[in-house]
Image: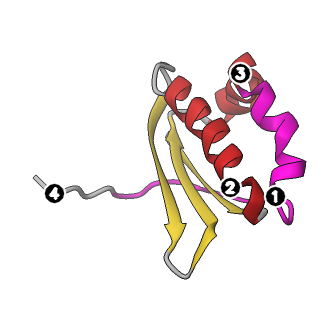
Amino acid sequence: MSVTYLIDFQVVPAKRERFLALLNGVLDAMRSEATFRDATLHVDPQDQNHFLLHETWADHDEVVAVQIKRPYRDDWHEALPQLLERPRGISIWTPLRCDRAR
């Protein structure tokens, strides 16, 4: 069963470009993973340093056992403490329905 992660980031303003560069590299690499379904990065229109990442994968256990440990995530994970004003918030959801425009 698919799993969706909602990840909330409050970025240090001076670190915004570095945050986006590292995250874009991770998102680009994720697209080629067999169990990856989709991801959407949102920015708060009231705060350009507040982001919400919505990503869906085929299986939570595989994400924890394999995906989180991919080498392309190393620089990202190492840099996060310096990039964020507070620890990221992560919530886990199970999709029930997905609608898209035709």
Type of colouring? secondary structure
The residue carrying mark 3 is 66
Residue under label 4 = 101
Q: Please tell me which of labels 4 and 1 falls first in the chain.
A: 1
**Left-right relation of 73 to 48:** right
In the rendered structure, which segment of residues is drawn in magenta? 73-97
- The x, y position of residue 51, in whole percent, is 61, 63
State the SS at label 3: loop
**Does label 2 or label 4 sit earlier along the sequence?**
2
Amino acid residing under circle 3: Val
Image coordinates for residue 30, horizontal then vertical, percent:
54, 27
The reply to whether dot 3 and dot 4 touch (C-beta < 8 Å) is: no
Q: Secondary structure at mark 4?
A: loop
Tell me the distance, in whole angstroms, between the alpha carbons under discs 4 and 1: 34 Å
Q: Does residue 95 lie above or below 33 as drawn? A: below
Q: Secondary structure at mark 1?
A: loop
The nearer-to-camera label among 2 and 4 is 2
Q: CA distance from mark 3 to mark 4?
A: 32 Å
